[in-house]
Image (cartoon, grey):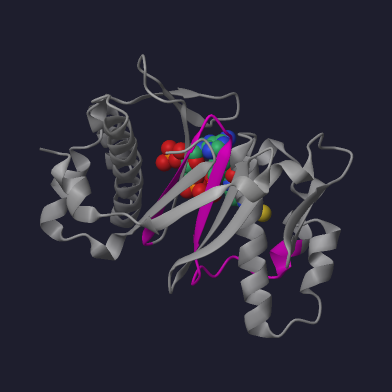
C-alpha cells in the first residue's frame, strides 16, 4: 500500500456457500466466534462473521505483502474511548488503520496507512431509513437538499447522507457522541462543512460513495491533508483467497 491509498473490500453474504462458513469462521479467534454465536438471528451471525473474517484476512494479506506473517486469528485490537477498534501492530508491521461495516447481506472493510478511515454500508431495502429520520439525524443544510426531489433521487440522497455521516463519525472514532447535525455534506461536489461545535478542517477529508452491489451503498471517509492525492483501491474481496488463509 502507498501512504496515500485507501483500500476498500466488500463481500456479499450471498457469495458464500454453506461449506465455506466453518472455514470463514476459523479466521476469527475464539472470543469473536463466541460473540458471533450470541446473535439471535443467523443473518447477524453471518454478516458479523464475514466482516471480521474479511478484516482479519485483509490485514493478513497486507502484512504478508510487507514481509510480516500474521495469522488471521492472531490480530489483536485496541478499543478507543467510543468503541473504535484499531489493530495492535506487531513489531515492523506497517501502521494500518481500519474500519469495518456490516449490514443485511454485505460486509465491507477499509484500510489506510496511518490515517483515520471510516466506512459504512447500508442495505437499500431497509425500511426504517426514511425521510422522517432526516430531521432527527441530518443537518439543516442536508435536509434542505432533500426538499423537492423525486422519490428515487430522494432515496439516493438519503442513503448517501446516511452512509457518509456514519463514515465520518466512524473515521474520527466518536460514534454518536458527535452531534450529527453539526456537520453537513453536499453530494455534488462531494464535500463537508462543520459548524462551530466541531473543530475540523473540511479540506483535509477525502470521501467516496460506492455501489458495491445492486442492493447496497457504501460511504467512505479518509483523513488526508491533500485529498486530491488520495488513491482509492476499491474492489470485491476474493473469496477463494480469503478461504485459503484458513489453511
Ligand atoms: C456503532 C457505530 C460506530 C456504527 O454502528 P452501525 O452503523 O450500526 O454499524 P457498522 O456495521 O457500520 O459498524 C460496526 C463496526 O464499527 C466498529 N466500531 C464500533 N465502534 C466504533 C466507533 N466508535 N468508531 C468507529 N468504528 C466503530 C466496530 O468494528 C463495529 O463492528 P462490530 O460491532 O462487528 O465489532 C455508531 O455510528 C452507531 O451506533 N450508529 C447507529 C446508527 C445511527 O443512528 N446512525 C445515524 C447516521 S446519520
Left-right relation of 191 to 219: right
Q: Report the front residue among 239 and 37.
A: 239
Name the spot of residue 239 as percent of width and height, x first. Answer: 23, 54
Left-right relation of 172 to 195: left
Q: Could you tell me which residue is drawn at 55 percent across and 25 percent down? A: 80
Q: Quadrant of the C terminus?
A: top left
Name the spot of residue 90 as percent of width and height, x first. Answer: 35, 17
Position above or below: 232 against 160: above
Name the spot of residue 211 as percent of width and height, x first. Answer: 49, 67
Residue 224, by quadrant, is top right
Position above or below: 106 against 101: below
Q: Quadrant of the N terminus?
A: top left
Q: Report the front residue among 157 and 231.
A: 231
Left-right relation of 177 to 65: right
Name the spot of residue 23 as percent of width and height, x first. Answer: 14, 45
Q: Could you tell me which residue is drawn at 43 percent across and 74 percent down? A: 214
Which contiguous range is marked in magenta? 105-134
Q: Could you tell me which residue is drawn at 23 percent across and 25 percent down? A: 69
Based on the picture, tell me whether residue 11 belongs to the magenta stretch: no
Based on the picture, tell me whether residue 116 belongs to the magenta stretch: yes
Q: Report the front residue among 33 and 147.
A: 147
Position above or below: 50 against 225: below
Amino acid at each position: 500500500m502507498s501512504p496515500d491509498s485507501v483500500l476498500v473490500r466488500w463481500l456479499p453474504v450471498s457469495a458464500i456457500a454453506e461449506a465455506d462458513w466453518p472455514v470463514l469462521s476459523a479466521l476469527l479467534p475464539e472470543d469473536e466466534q463466541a460473540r458471533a454465536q450470541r446473535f439471535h438471528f443467523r443473518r447477524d451471525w453471518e454478516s458479523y462473521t464475514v466482516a471480521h473474517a474479511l478484516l482479519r484476512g485483509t490485514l493478513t494479506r497486507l502484512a504478508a505483502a510487507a514481509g510480516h506473517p500474521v495469522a488471521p486469528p492472531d490480530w489483536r485490537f485496541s478499543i478507543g474511548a467510543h468503541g473504535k477498534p484499531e489493530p495492535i501492530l506487531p513489531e515492523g508491521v506497517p501502521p494500518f488503520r481500519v474500519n469495518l461495516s456490516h449490514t443485511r447481506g454485505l460486509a465491507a472493510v477499509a484500510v489506510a496507512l496511518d490515517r483515520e478511515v471510516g466506512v459504512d454500508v447500508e442495505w437499500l431495502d431497509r425500511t426504517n431509513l426514511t425521510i422522517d429520520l432526516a430531521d432527527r439525524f441530518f443537518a439543516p443544510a442536508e435536509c434542505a437538499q432533500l426538499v423537492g426531489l423525486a422519490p428515487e433521487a430522494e432515496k439516493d440522497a438519503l442513503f448517501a447522507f446516511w452512509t457518509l455521516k456514519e463514515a465520518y463519525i466512524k473515521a474520527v472514532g466518536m460514534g454518536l457522541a458527535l452531534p450529527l447535525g453539526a456537520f453537513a455534506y453536499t453530494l455534488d461536489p462531494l464535500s463537508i462543512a462543520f459548524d462551530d461545535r466541531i473543530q475540523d478542517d473540511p479540506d483535509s477529508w477525502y470521501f467516496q460513495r460506492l455501489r458495491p452491489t445492486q442492493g447496497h451503498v457504501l460511504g467512505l471517509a479518509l483523513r488526508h491533508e491533500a485529498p486530491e492525492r488520495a488513491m482509492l483501491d476499491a474492489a470485491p474481496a476474493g473469496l477463494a483467497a480469503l478461504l485459503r488463509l484458513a489453511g
